[in-house]
């Protein structure tokens, strides 16, 4: 495996391999010396054409714990904001000898373009592209679910997950549907009909418009961020009505099974899709997701880069 | 000065009969099995099909304004290479062809290139803005004799503007060629809306956005008793509406592009914007419906929607890229592959749909007369038994955005004659 562009790039063995590697690496993160020499001398570029503090910091921490050299290349003030093409940016990174590029981009498919066009020879890791995918988020979510509910199994067979909210615009939802399905979990998508894509019927997931009827059935409730501007695009009348039907509040928390956990990829809109009391409750694993993110991203970098010496990629 | 003479020997006419054709000067002077002229240049076209010169009703020549992507001259060369003897220059140039000055300029550039006829299409509305009618009469009465009016690229969306345009063109025996795209349903749209767009996270361009406008326009056309041409139909639903309208006797014609006869939205999975086009590639079901509609005459013609773009507007992220693909040099081969080789259409049918019918819709003087003695010698010769491999690096067009790069296609266009002059000889543009 050279790139991680989509969950579709992973076989079941690959996915479990990353989760197992992350488990190993998280033990190191918990130890006194957090750093491994694995990627010493390798250069990883964080190419963030779209603002994202948390994902960039998570990848940066992961790379540094593996002793890689990290270069941050952000949208604001960089050549990207001055209209430089993806091609020129890629060729610049190639000239600088990047072994891997972690790319966050507003355009769906931008990481695949970077990988396919051979403007650069390094690995491409998709850190979220438009409304397409966010595979490292799905892997850290699966890692978190397995830790809490896996009962020692390698996969997530039989676990029921509800993904709630703006599925239409969510790259997190797309990657999670694919990965959870690959790992044997059952996904129910819960959203107003306006925020489900036409064609969603072909996804390996059950569809529901009724959060209350789903909550008692599932082991995991994964809330998605709802952006305020969706209201002006007529997806729902107003924030209050959205919360009334699709917000996770204390009354709804009471409907959940005792062992069920609450997740959110962040950043949260407290009071819109999730009530503050719920976000901060004992059932919430939201902060833990962030910590797990570093271990999972270390595992991704490890699997893609360790072993192959710098510049040895053929073709 | 003696007139040039050619004898095309050994080929078959669209109806399958073997005939030699004698071209004298700018006209076809004899068609029979034995014709032979001592002083003529003999061209052996044994095994080839001889078609009347192809007429494209939908071409983007980019001049004036984007000569870095295409010029009238380079598009004329691409046309000759593809077997065309007439192109129609869409109005979305810069400046827009919404006045007599621009259409006359484009017309004269076509004459100067001299490889085929260039018939300018006039904009329906000033600046393609969809608000005020352009100077339709001035364009109709200009040297360019414009009869086809289109805001292609933009839909004449306002129903009142469309009604007035349909009414007004009746004075000039004109036709409105509509780019059917409901703008509110396609804000920011990137590709066909369906399973693939849902998976790829690219904003959908629903079939209904095309069908709703076609439905409205055929009803308007009926109401004001005018004439409508529907550009690049792409959906099975659009075909059904046109079939219904024709059955009602509404004066509507329609076109399909070669790429919509072959390619589907699955190709967007590559995120390579070479497959980004407006209207978008649809599903396999739509492709089949379009082929059947072209075969049964519901769709009257094939038109290329040849849309050249520079490298940088395609070598980028999908959503940043321009819409459009090249079409002139591959059109006839794609039609052979999708329609003739599949048994859906005879060569006679191809001649109607790519020469006679488009010339009739555009009222193009001198074009589409068929292969008859006395007709202007506009001729295209294709060897259907040969195949070729599309190579974007050796196209005649100034741009290289063909979606068929690397495809092996049937049918090699070997000769094109425009007014009796060889514009393509053994595959080489004269």
Image (cartoon, rainbow, N blue to C red):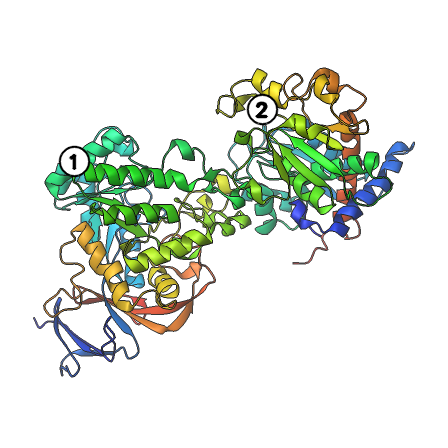
Q: Residues within 10 Å of mark 2 (few under 14, many from 20)?
A: some
Position above or below: B20 against A109: below
For image coordinates 17% across by 34% down, the residue present is B135
Q: Which residue is most to the front?
A: A213
Subunit bearing disc 2 = A
For image coordinates 67% across by 45% down, the residue present is A7
**B338 vs A44, nearest the viewer:** B338
Q: Is residue A198 something one can see in this rendering?
A: yes
**B5 vs A293, nearest the viewer:** A293
The C terminus of chain A appears in which quarter of the rendering? bottom right
Residue A239 in picture, x, y percent from top left = 57, 17
Residue B9 in picture, x, y percent from top left = 22, 79
Nearer the observer: mark 2 or 1; the answer is: 1
Position above or below: B295 against A98: below
In-image side of A14 versus A92 (left or right): right
Q: Residues within 10 Å of mark 1 (few under 14, many from 20)?
A: many
**B197 vs B101, nearest the viewer:** B197
Q: Is residue B235 something one can see in this rendering?
A: no
The kind of secondary structure element at disc 1 is: helix
Residue A173 in picture, x, y percent from top left = 64, 36
- Residue denoted by label 1: B167
Subunit bearing disc 1 = B
In-image side of B2 versus A295 (left or right): left
Real-space CA distance between mark 2 and mark 1, rounded to the nearest whole angstrom: 46 Å
Do marks 2 and 1 both belong to one polypeptide chain? Answer: no
Residue A227 disc label: 2
For image coordinates 17% across by 45% down, the residue present is B147
The kind of secondary structure element at disc 2 is: loop
In-image side of A108 versus B92 (left or right): right
């Amino acid at each position: 495996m050279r790139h991680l562009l989509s969950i579709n790039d992973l076989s079941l063995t690959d996915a479990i391999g990353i989760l197992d590697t992350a488990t190993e690496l998280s033990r190191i993160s918990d130890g006194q010396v957090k750093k491994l020499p694995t990627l010493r001398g390798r250069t990883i570029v964080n190419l963030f054409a779209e603002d994202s503090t948390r994902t960039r910091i998570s990848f940066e921490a992961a790379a540094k714990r593996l002793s890689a050299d990290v270069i941050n290349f952000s949208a604001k003030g960089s050549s990207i904001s001055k209209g430089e093409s993806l091609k020129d940016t890629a060729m610049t990174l190639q000239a600088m000898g990047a072994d891997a590029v972690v790319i966050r981009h507003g355009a769906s498919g931008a990481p695949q373009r970077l990988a396919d066009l051979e403007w650069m020879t390094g690995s491409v890791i998709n850190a979220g592209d438009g409304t397409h995918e966010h595979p490292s988020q799905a892997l850290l979510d699966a890692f978190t679910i397995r830790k809490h509910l896996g009962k020692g199994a390698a996969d997530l067979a039989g676990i029921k997950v509800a993904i709630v909210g703006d599925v239409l615009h969510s790259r997190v939802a797309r990657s999670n549907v694919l990965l959870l399905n690959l790992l044997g979990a059952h996904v129910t998508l819960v959203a107003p009909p306006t925020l489900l894509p036409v064609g969603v019927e072909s996804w390996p997931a059950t569809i529901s418009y009724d959060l209350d009827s789903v909550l008692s059935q599932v082991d995991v409730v994964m809330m998605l961020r709802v952006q305020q501007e969706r209201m002006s695009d007529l997806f729902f009348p107003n924030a209050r009505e959205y919360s009334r039907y699709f917000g996770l509040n204390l009354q709804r928390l009471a409907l959940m099974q005792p062992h069920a956990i609450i997740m959110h990829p962040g950043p949260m809109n407290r009071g819109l899709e999730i009530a503050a009391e719920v976000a901060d409750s004992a059932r919430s694993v939201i902060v833990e997701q962030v910590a797990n993110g570093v271990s999972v991203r270390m595992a991704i970098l490890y699997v893609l880069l360790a072993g192959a010496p710098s510049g040895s990629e053929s073709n | 000065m003696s007139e040039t003479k050619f004898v095309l020997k050994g080929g078959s006419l669209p109806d399958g009969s073997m005939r030699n054709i004698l071209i004298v000067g700018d006209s076809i002077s004899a068609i029979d099995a034995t014709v032979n002229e001592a002083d003529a240049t003999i061209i052996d076209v044994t095994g080839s099909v001889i078609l009347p010169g192809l007429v494209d009703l939908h071409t983007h020549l980019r001049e004036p304004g984007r000569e870095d992507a295409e010029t009238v001259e380079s598009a004329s060369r691409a046309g000759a290479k593809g077997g065309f003897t007439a192109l129609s220059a869409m109005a979305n140039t810069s400046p827009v062809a919404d006045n007599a000055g621009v259409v006359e300029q484009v017309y004269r550039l076509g004459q100067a290139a001299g490889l085929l006829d260039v018939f300018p299409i006039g904009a329906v509305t000033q600046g393609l803005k969809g608000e005020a009618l352009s100077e339709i009469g001035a364009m109709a009465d200009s040297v360019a004799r414009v009869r086809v009016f289109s805001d292609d690229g933009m839909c004449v969306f306002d129903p009142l503007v469309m009604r007035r345009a349909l009414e007004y063109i009746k004075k000039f025996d004109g036709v409105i060629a509509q780019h059917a795209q409901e703008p509110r349903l396609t804000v920011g749209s990137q590709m066909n809306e369906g399973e693939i767009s849902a998976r790829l996270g690219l904003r959908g361009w629903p079939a209904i956005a095309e069908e709703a406008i076609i439905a409205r326009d055929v009803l308007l056309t009926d109401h004001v008793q005018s004439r409508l041409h529907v550009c690049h139909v792409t959906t099975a639903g659009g075909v059904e509406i046109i079939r219904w309208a024709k059955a009602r006797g509404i004066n509507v014609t329609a076109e399909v592009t070669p790429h919509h006869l072959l390619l589907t939205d699955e190709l967007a999975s590559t995120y390579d914007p070479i497959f980004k086009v407006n209207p978008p590639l649809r599903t396999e079901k739509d492709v089949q419906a379009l082929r059947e509609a072209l075969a049964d005459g519901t769709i009257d013609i094939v038109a290329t929607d040849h849309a050249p773009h520079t490298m940088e507007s395609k070598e980028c992220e999908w959503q940043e890229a321009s819409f459009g693909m090249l079409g002139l040099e591959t059109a006839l081969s794609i039609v052979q592959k999708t329609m003739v080789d599949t048994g859906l259409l005879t060569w006679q049918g191809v001649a109607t749909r790519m020469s006679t019918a488009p010339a009739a819709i555009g009222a193009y003087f001198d074009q589409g007369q068929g292969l008859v003695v006395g007709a202007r010698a506009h001729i295209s010769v294709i060897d259907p038994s040969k195949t070729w491999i599309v190579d974007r690096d050796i196209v005649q067009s100034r741009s290289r955005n063909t979606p068929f790069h690397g495809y092996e296609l049937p049918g090699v266009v070997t000769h094109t004659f425009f007014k009796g002059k060889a514009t393509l000889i053994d595959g080489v543009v004269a």
